[in-house]
Image: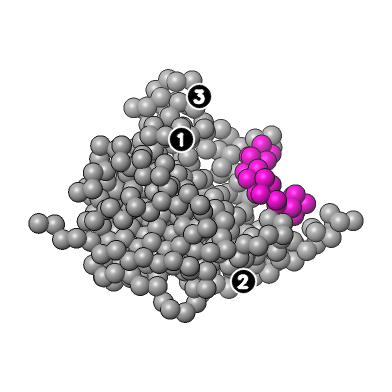
Amino acid sequence: METKLLTLIIFGLIVQVGTSQATEVSKSNIVGFSSHIKIDKSRPSVKDGKFGRTIQINIWYPAKIETGSSKMFFSDYLGVKGNEMGVNESPQNYSKTVESYFQWPISQGANQLLIDSLVSAKLPMRAVTDGKFKPGKHPVILLIHGSAVDFAFLGESLAEQGYIAINIPVKGYRQKELDVNGIGMETEIRDYEFALSTLSDHPNIALTDIVALGFSFGGQSALGLACRNPNIKTVISFDGGIGSSFGARLIKESPFCRVENIAASLLHIYDSSYERTYLDQIRSFIYADRTLVGLTGIAHWHFTSFGHLASQIPNLFGKNEFAEHGYDTILEIIKGYLNSKSQNPNKIFNLPEDGFDLVGEVEYLRPVKRK
């Protein structure tokens, strides 16, 4: 009885969310999504160690509707995740993917019955498959440290704004699990360098003024990528490790990330209640424009698709004291930041005074002029 009731509740919420998204899409750009498997022959496979690393490249892009284009559902992104290793989707593989993906929210108190209903229901997304790129060159945002499903709502939102969002699922150098150290950082960096090389001749992708957005451990990788690729002009840290002593050490140990090589504009959004927050390393990047925004009432998962789902489905993570609109606040901050930098890269971004009740701490650090 309880399961049926929850299924009916979540079905009603999904219809409501889907209707809202459809209305928004009709008033905005069409979003396309595609996923491609490429092989990097210069590095070993995580399966058998032989040369040939499988790289899944996920792309959200401004599109135009074509006859035969198919609307995506949230479950489609779970299917893409199941194909990260180049394995064709099967019912067994899909089930394992679903179980693996929802381990984190379950460990944080998520309601299993609600999750089961969410997976079985058809949650409509904004993206379509098989859509052609909208004509013209479009700026690029790299979404680092996660999979297509982790960045699904963010990728679609960015594509609606005219960006091409690119994601490479995270995995280790010689195994599926990421090496949580300097090797892992280098692995993520090289994955994105390979993807950018693969896409360098694409007629609709502008590989100048790139934005690197890194979540969690990906904060170090995003900054490390910018240190050695001057086309990356902006780094956005989603509760990134660069705001911790561990991440600061990895950046300091990188031969590419000497202070004089860090010039990209940097936005670091973080959980201000985290007791191990360490911002001195970011403050030391004196040649970069830095904006540090500490939020209250949020959790680490607010920066992923779980944050959006939790804002739409009450009690998805169980009863807790976290703000329901944490994801929306994060999204509005980066929208404002990107818009500000696109208009004037040298102007310091200032948060509006109203509308951001979760903002607890803000620090603006102007760059020092080089001699």
Mark on residue 48? none
Left or right: 130 in relation to 15: left
Left or right: 223 in relation to 170: left
Please identify, in this view, whether the residue under mark 2 or under mark 1 is nearer the observer: 1
For label 3, count other residues whose C-alpha is less than 10 Å away and answer few (under 14), some (14-19) or many (20+).
Answer: few
| Residue 197 pos. (x, y %) | 30, 41
Pointers 2 and 1 in contact (CB under 8 A)? no
> Which residue appears farthest toward the left when viewing the image?
371
Decide which of tag 2 and tag 3 comes sooner along the chain: 2
Q: Which residue is labeled 1 in the image?
A: 180
Q: From the viewer's side, name the closer residue of 194 and 225.
A: 225
| Residue 101 pos. (x, y %) | 62, 44
Q: How is the image coloured?
A: one colour
Res 279 seen here: yes
Q: Quadrant of the C terminus?
A: bottom left
Q: Is residue 29 above or below residue 53?
A: below
Q: Which residue is labeled 2 in the image?
A: 20
Q: Main secondary structure of the magenta part?
A: helix
